[in-house]
Structures are given as structure tokens and as C-alpha cells.
Amino acid sequence: MCNHKVVFYTPENKTNTKSYFRTPGADIVESSDSFTIHLNLPGVKKEDLEITVVEQLLTVTGKLKRALKEGEQYLINEIRHAGYQRKFKLAESIETENIAAEFSDGVLSIALAKKPEIQPRTINIK
Amino acid sequence: MSLIRFNPVRELLSVEREFSRLFNELENKFGIPTKQGTDSEMENAVWMPVTDSYENEKGYELNLEIPGIKKEDVKISLVNGALRISGERNQSKSEENGKFHRVERVYGKFFRSFNLPEGIKEDAIEAEFHDGQLTVQIPKAEEVRPKELQIKVK
């Protein structure tokens, strides 16, 4: 169809080869006028979430606060406490001015509107 | 349509199921009755939540990551000293017909059980669910001090 098919890819994080953040799983759903990214960010508080868009690069960072308290020890430790980070390169066909985000039950949903040019439109017949 | 991700645990479980079926059949041939009530919660589970567990003087704490699930869809029970946590994550109805470019989150039923140690207050277990994280507090029972009885010698 058009070039917005290759909208999302996660650019490699070359500067930080250690990549100590966890990469959260993402679902990307397309509807006729928008894309929605769902990210699993369990344990992150709303105020510890950061979403930035710089030159069509969408970055989501979530921090985890739970650390080992005094007099505590791990019995099971499967969760990496560094937090989450994921980047998405957005195509030019996406409106970066109005991005809406919603966070509930540990899932962040980011709604990305398509530019009017690529939205389907009906043509009226005179 | 629901998408089910490949889960190695599930594969292992199916092997385990096949073996127990074989053994049950064998036992039947020798006249031993099969055990009733299979663990359907465990057998139907597709994924297992990642967990942290802490211990301190007062008790134990479990942190489970179960994002995208409503509070009322999480089931916690204590059966024979084992804490069983189960539930299900479903795809939202409104998006079922959407075009998926990526599906990396796991959908379906989950299950995890923890064998609790002895010396805990079973009645005082509390669970909280915030931001996709389930926190279970398991307090330790106060140590029962051995009673000292003074017996007078007549």
C-alpha cells in the first residue's frame, strides 16, 4: 500500500551495549486512522514513566522502585530491577504532535494518529 | 482469534501429562484406582508470571508481574499449604479485528503455585494488586515459646 508499513522497528541501542534495561513486550495494532502500541510495564508507577519523541524516535522508559530493604533477602529473584526501555522509530506518516497515552493495570497504551494523507477517505460524488 | 505463544513449560507439561496417563493406565491394569481430580488450572495454563520473593523477620513477600489483567480476574487460593495464583489475560474485544503488526505479549491462562514454608499465619495472608503487579504478604507466626512449668516438690 504505502510506505507506512515499515513504521515500527526498534533501533539498536549502540551507545549502551550493556543494555541493562528490560525490553518490554509490545503489541502494535493498526486501525483505519491510528496505530496503538501496548506495552507491558508491570510494577511501574505512573509518575516513573517517561515518554519522549525526538525526531520521530519514540522512547518509553519506566523505572522500578522496589529494592531490597534492610533485613530482607531474596528467595526468588526473577525480576530485573533496572526498569524498562523501548524505542520505536516512527514513520513520517505519523502525527507526532498529538500522541495520547494511557496507563492502566501495568499496560501502557500509546495512540498514534495517522496523518490525514494516509487515512482512508470517502469521496463524495456530486 | 486468540494467539498462543510457544511456551516450553507447556510442552514439558504435556510430556508430564502423557507419562501420568501411561502410569494411570498401568495402575488400572493392576486394579489400583486412579487418582481423582486432575489439576486443570495447571494443565490449562499457557504462561507463568515472573516473580520476586523476599523474606524478612516478619514474613514473606511475593511480587508477581501480571500486567493487563483486571483485579477481579486474579484468583488466589491456599490449598494444602500451597499458594495457587491463576487467571487469564484476554485480548480486548475492540481490537480483535484490528491489524496486528506485532504481538509480543502473551495471552491466555496463567498459573503459578508456591509451596509455603511452615510457621506462617495462614489467616493473615494479604494480597494487593497495583499497576500490573500482585503483591502477596505472608506473615510469619510468632514463635511459640516452650512453656516452663515449675513443679513444686512436696
Image (tube, rainbow, N blue to C red):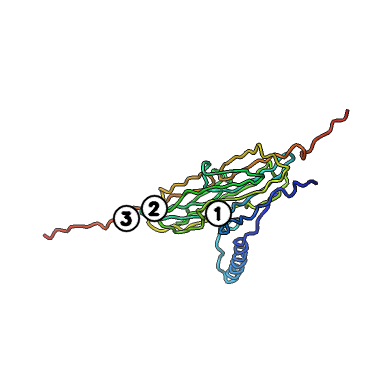
- Neighbour tally class for label 3: few under 14, some 14-19, many 20 plus, Cα within 10 Å: few
- Residue under label 1, please give it: A21
Q: Nearer the viewer, mark 3 or mark 2?
A: 2
- Residue under label 2, please give it: B59
Residue A115, located in which quarter of the rendered image? top right
Q: Earlier in the sequence, mark 3 or mark 2?
A: 2
Q: Position of residue B95 (x, y in %)?
A: 69, 43
Q: Amino acid at mark 3?
A: Glu
How many numbered marks have been drawn onto this rendered protein structure? 3
Chain ID at mark 2: B
Judge left or right: residue B30 versus residue A118. Answer: left
Q: Are marks 1 and 3 on the same chain?
A: no
Residue lying farthest right? Answer: A126
State if disc 2 and disc 3 touch (CB < 8 Å).
no
Q: Position of residue A65 (x, y in %)?
A: 47, 48
Q: Position of residue A109 (x, y in %)?
A: 62, 43
Above or below for B148 versus A64: below
Chain ID at mark 3: B
In space, the residues marked 3 and 2 are separated at their CA atoms by: 12 Å
- Tell me, for residue B143, which label it has, or none: 3
Q: Secondary structure at mark 3?
A: loop
Q: Front-most of A3 and B114?
A: A3
In space, the residues marked 1 and 2 are separated at their CA atoms by: 30 Å
Q: Amino acid at mark 1?
A: Phe
Judge left or right: residue B56 versus residue A64. Answer: left
